[in-house]
Every structure is written in C-alpha cells, then in structure tokens.
Image: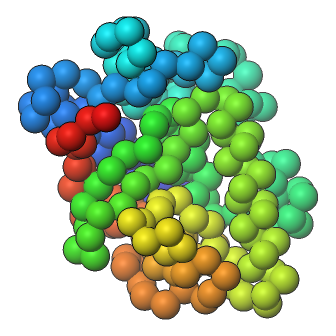
Amino acid sequence: MTSTNITLAQTLLNFSKNYSEQHIKQLGYLPTVEHDEKWLSPCDLGPHDVSQHYWQPVAMDSEQLTDNKEEALSFSNVESALNLELHPDIKTYFTTIFSGDIKAMCEEGELSLLFAWNKEDFDRLQENLIGHILMKQKLKQAETIFFAVTDEEDIIISVDNNSGEVWVERVGCKPHKKLSDSLVDFISQLTPKSLLIEK
C-alpha cells in the first residue's frame, strides 16, 4: 500500500468516526438501521428498539473479520473480468471500512458515500462496478468508478480510473464537473451530515 493509500485509509477512518460522533452529539445515540437477520454486519451493535439496531463504521482489518482478508476483499476478480487495473484509491476506499451509507455535505450539496455493509454487499458492489465500467466501455467513454450518489437520481460522484480525480457525472454520460484532484482531498473537504429526522 502506498503512502497515498495509507493517507486515504486514515482519512476515511477519521471521517467515519466523526460521522458517528456527530450523530451522538446531535441525537444522543449512534446511527440506527432496520435490523435484518439475513443481512448481518460487523457494523451492527445491537438493539435500539424492537426493529432498529445501532451501527457504526468498522475498520475491515479488525478482529471481527476472518483471516482471509486478501481473498475476501480483493478486486482481482473485477480486474480480471474487465482486463483492467482499477485505480489504487478506489480499491483502498472500498476495502477500508464496512459501513452503511454515510451522508455528507460538500460545496455542491448533499451526497451519500457508498460502502459495503458486509462481505455479501462487497460482492454485490463489485458486480455493480463491473456493470458500470462495461457500460462506459460500450459508450467508448473513459472508465470511472462511482463511490457516492446525490439527491438527483442519475447524478453520481466517481473517480476517473486513469487520473484518480473526483468528478460529477450523469449516468451514461461523460463526467462534466471536476470536484477534486484525488479521493483523499475530496473526503477531507466533506462534512458528515447526521440524519436529524429518523424514520
């Protein structure tokens, strides 16, 4: 792992910790999620009430994971399927923490950072990334990898696979607005946004 990737991993860990702390500060408790017995996660911290459980982001290298981290959390199958090497930042981003979506604010407005909730979700995420990249290749557009969604249904935030730059793009279209030179710079500019009204 390069020094940039170590910095990105630490930035993500700090940001996710800030999100949890802000949630406690604003609402008095950690974020909650509807509990699903068939969709367990190392993020799950037990009951808040009858249907909701507390959760918080968890570092993937914690003791809650099995020993076969490399096998479980590798993007090699994606790269092999696409005959393409993914940008190191995107691999670091998706293999640093297990987490629910984290809402955040940037200069452009509100967004939700996407993460894997568990190992099965990581597998599903890989399938979605393959689909996205194949679509970009079919459209003869430069490959991007999405990592966040916005309030607008078809607007996503992605990383340019060649440069590592962070861009806004409309699904099916070329990226149209550069937000940052790198993922670590972009995450550093974000402010965690707790849900003030929980369903």
Q: Nearer the viewer, residue 6 or 136?
A: 136
Q: Nearer the viewer, residue 17 or 39?
A: 39
Quadrant assignment for the C terminus: top left
Q: Based on the displayed image, in which of its 4 quarters is residue 36 positioned?
A: top right
Q: Nearer the viewer, residue 194 or 60?
A: 194
Is any atom of residue 176 visible in this view?
yes
Q: In the image, what residue occupies the spot 53% across and 26% down?
A: 61
Question: Picture coordinates of residue 169 (x, y %)?
Answer: 52, 80
Relative to residue 150, is residue 158 drawn left or right? right
Q: Based on the displayed image, in which of its 4 quarters is residue 122 positioned?
A: top right
Question: Picture coordinates of residue 130 (x, y %)?
Answer: 78, 60
Q: In the image, what residue occupies the spot 32% across and 11% down?
A: 49
Question: Picture coordinates of residue 173 (x, y %)?
Answer: 63, 87
Q: How does the figure colour the protein chain or chains?
A: rainbow
Where 92 falls versus 177 (above or below)? above
Where 63 falls versus 83 (above or below)? above
The number of numbered discs placed on residues in the rendered structure image is 0
Q: In the image, what residue occupies the spot 49% across and 74% down?
A: 155
Is any atom of residue 190 visible in this view?
no
Where 150 falls versus 162 (above or below)? above
Q: In the image, what residue occupies the spot 17% across and 42% down?
A: 196
Q: Nearer the viewer, residue 3 or 152?
A: 152
Question: Picture coordinates of residue 187 (x, y %)?
Answer: 34, 59
